[in-house]
Amino acid sequence: MILLETYPDGRFITNIHFPSKQGLVSLLFFDLKNNLGKIIISNTNFSDKKGNDAFYGIWNMPEKYQTKL
């Protein structure tokens, strides 16, 4: 596991799998302060704009609702 980003408030993003084949990715995000997290496992090619936009659209979706939980 490789730690990709850490934040002073306890949030962090890490990957669990970046294989040699392009397009496969698994990411974990944890917000320890608010006890929230998200996991995404994808088979999206990031060199394709449509795939890239879809991935980040899904990744960012929980942020709209996490304060309502």
Image: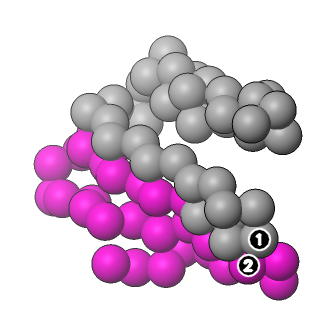
Looking at the image, which is closer to me, 29 or 3?
29
11 relative position to 52: left or right: right
Specify how the rendered protein is coloured: one colour
- Mark 1–mark 2 CB contact (< 8 Å): yes
The disc, 1 or 2, on the residue closer to the chain's N-terminal end is 2
Q: Quadrant of the N terminus?
A: bottom left
Looking at the image, which is closer to me, 27 or 33?
33
Dot 2 amino acid type: Gly
Q: Which SS class for mark 2?
A: loop
Figure quadrant of residue 61: top right
Q: Which SS class for mark 1?
A: loop
Measured along the vertical axis of the image, is residue 30 above or below residue 60? below
Dot 1 amino acid type: Lys
**Residue farthest top in this picture:** 50
The kind of secondary structure the magenta stretch mainly shows is strand
Is residue 17 shown in magenta? Answer: yes
- The residue that label 2 is drawn on is 10
Q: Residue at position x 41%, y 42% from top?
A: 40
Residue 24 in the image, given as x and y percentages of width and height = 25, 44
Q: Residue at position x 73%, y 78% from top?
A: 10
Residue 69 in the image, given as x and y percentages of width and height = 74, 36
- The residue that label 1 is drawn on is 33
Q: Residue at position x 54%, y 73% from top?
A: 4
Magenta residues, start to end: 1-29
Looking at the image, which is closer to me, 61 or 53?
61
